Image (cartoon, rainbow, N blue to C red):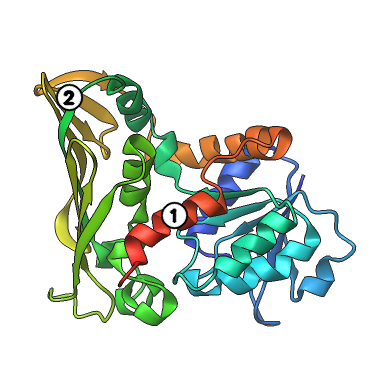
Amino acid sequence: MKVLIVGLGSIASKHIAALKNIDPKVEFYAMRSSLNADSKEGITNVFSFEDLNDIELDFAIISNPTSAHKETIERLIPKKIPLFIEKPLFSSLENEAVLQKIENNNIPTYVACNLRFLDCLKFAKKHIQGKRINEVNVYCGSYLPDWRPGIDYKTTYSANKKLGGGVHIDLIHEIDYAYWLFGKPQEVNKVFSSKSSLNIDAYDYANYMLAYPTFNANIILNYFRRDPKRTLEIVCDDQTLKVDILKNTVYQNQEIIYSSEKTIIDTYEDQLRFFIDEVIAKGNKFNTANEAYQILKICLQND
């Protein structure tokens, strides 16, 4: 298996480790922006898309800054290979023409929102089938300076609006799994701000209210919470379900009804196996670029 990596950062390292577990003989090619880029063991550096002409790639992983996704996708479409695109798909809603090019060229795509593969959320999806939901509350708060130890958080894309950063889109996982669990909302209201002591220009707080026919879903995201919290609460007419994503555990009326020892790291391998076995091999459509664009609209429309 031969795989191209565009954007050799921290998230790419997780995908590389997962792929090595799936296929120890995998061959990696990394698109580098500088001739002076460091060489990494087991990875062949390439410096232009023309360098790929004689390489029969199985697929590409796009994990460079969000603001560069559009150009990268356009450069890869002529290669006619499947695209595994790190979330979020784009940093703006001005890229519908790219989606049409993907469709016209029959390019298989998957946008990597790996929480769909987390055991507790998969359990919750099955558990709520047929239940009357009255309210949904989603919360994700953590401390941005702790995300990448040893790196000044103000220099990262997360903290910089022009690079496609901001909690409203960086933590799109929460919007994505709400869409996956409950479907497309009828109406979206939202408040974004950057008022905390982090002093960044990108949004560090986002509050979404998604309106569904019989309930509302409230989603709060932030970069400034010191004690991490990541939960989903589903209030039904006969029970309250609470999903603790960090513990991979589900509670019903405060009693544990499901728990998994697997961690979020395991989802990286699970989603890549799905991408290879289902999206590429069988043509299964799951969180395609088109679907991810609909979710992106929730985040960015009228921003």
Residue 137 shows in the view: no
Horizontal side of 94 relative to 34 (left or right) equals left
- Residue at 52% over, 56% down: 86
Q: Nearer the viewer, mark 2 or mark 1?
A: 1
In the rendered image, the vertical position of residue 261 relative to residue 115, given as above or below: above
Quarter of the image where one finds residue 154: bottom left
Task: Judge whether 253 appears above or below 172 on screen.
Answer: above
Q: Quadrant of the C terminus?
A: bottom left
Left or right of 281, for residue 241? left
Q: Determine the residue positioned at 62% across, 66% down.
A: 98
- Considering the numbered disc 1 on the image, is that residue within a helix, a strand or a loop? helix
Left or right, 265 with respect to 74, comes to left
Residue type beneath disc 1: Gln
Residue on which disc 1 sits: 294
Question: The residue tagged with tag 2: helix, strand or loop?
Answer: strand
The kind of residue on which mark 2 rests is: Tyr
Q: Residues within 10 Å of mark 1 (few under 14, many from 20)?
A: some
